[in-house]
Amino acid sequence: MLTDIQEVLFTPEQISERVAQMGEAITRDYAPRVEAGEGVVMMCVLRGAAIFMADLARAVRLPLEMDYMAVSSYGAAAKSSGIVRINKDLSGSIQGKHLIIAEDIIDSGLTLNYLRKNLASRNPLSIEVAAMLRKDIPREQDVECKYLGFECPDEFVVGYGLDFAERYRNLSSIGVLKPEVYE
Ligand code: IMP
Ligand code: MG
C-alpha cells in the first residue's frame, strides 16, 4: 500500500498525539453537561470516520453513546458529486442529548452542512463537529468545526480510515495518494 503513497502527511504518532488532545478538549467542554445529567452521543460518519472515532471516543473520559450513520457523497470517484445520500441512519434518538459528529475530512463541506441540517431537525441539545482533517481551500459555505485534527493540503489523501475506491483505509498514517493511482 505504501508504494502508492507519494508523501506521508501525518504519522501514527502525530495522529495519536493530536487525537489525545482533541479528547481532552471534549472531556473538558462536556464534563459540566454530563455532571448536569445530560447525555452525549458521539456519532460516526461511516465509513471514513470509523477509525478516527474509535480512537477519539477512547480519548474522551466521560460516558458516551456511540452511534453510526452512513452517507455517500463520492462513489468511487475522487471528486465531490455534491449529492449526499443516507445509506444507514442512526440507531438511537439524539433528542435532548448533545451530539458530536465525528467526521474524517471536510472537503467541500457539503456532507457536513447537509448532516448538520438533517440532525438539527431531530432536536438535540447541541451539535458540534470533530473532524480529523480539513482541506485548506476556500469554500462557498462556511463549515463549523469545533474540534479539528489537522489542516491538510488540497490533494487526495488516504489512510486512517480514508479510502480511495475502498482501499487504504487500514493504513495507519495519512498520506497523499500518487495521482497516477486515481487518474
Ligand atoms: P465534502 O462533502 O466535499 O466535504 O466531502 C466529504 C467526504 O468526501 C469525506 O467525508 C470523505 O469521505 C470524502 N473525501 C473528501 N476528500 C477526500 C480525500 O482527499 N480522500 C478521501 N476521501 C475524501
Ligand atoms: Mg466521509
Image (spheres, grey):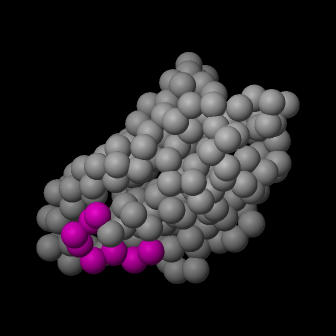
Left or right, 81 with reference to 92:
right
The reply to whether the magenta stretch includes residue 141 is no
- Residue positioned 56% across, 31% down in the render: 7
Of residues 177 and 117, the one nearer the viewer is: 177
Which quarter shows the C terminus? top right
| Residue 2 appears in view | yes
Which residue lies most toward the front here?
3
Residue 114, placed above or below residue 71: above
- How many tags in the picture? 0
Left or right, 17 with reference to 54:
left
Magenta part of the chain: 59-66
- Residue positioned 17% across, 65% down in the render: 31
Left or right, 93 with reference to 89:
left
- Residue positioned 44% across, 74% down in the render: 66
> Could you tell me what secondary structure mostly forms the magenta stretch?
loop
Residue 171, placed above or below residue 66: above
Q: Position of residue 113 (x, y in %)?
A: 58, 43
Q: Position of residue 63 (x, y in %)?
A: 27, 77
Q: Position of residue 147 (x, y in %)?
A: 35, 45
Of residues 166 and 135, the one nearer the viewer is: 166
Of residues 129 and 149, the one nearer the viewer is: 149
The reply to whether the magenta stretch includes residue 61 is yes
| Residue 116 appears in view | no
- Residue positioned 65% across, 71% down in the render: 89
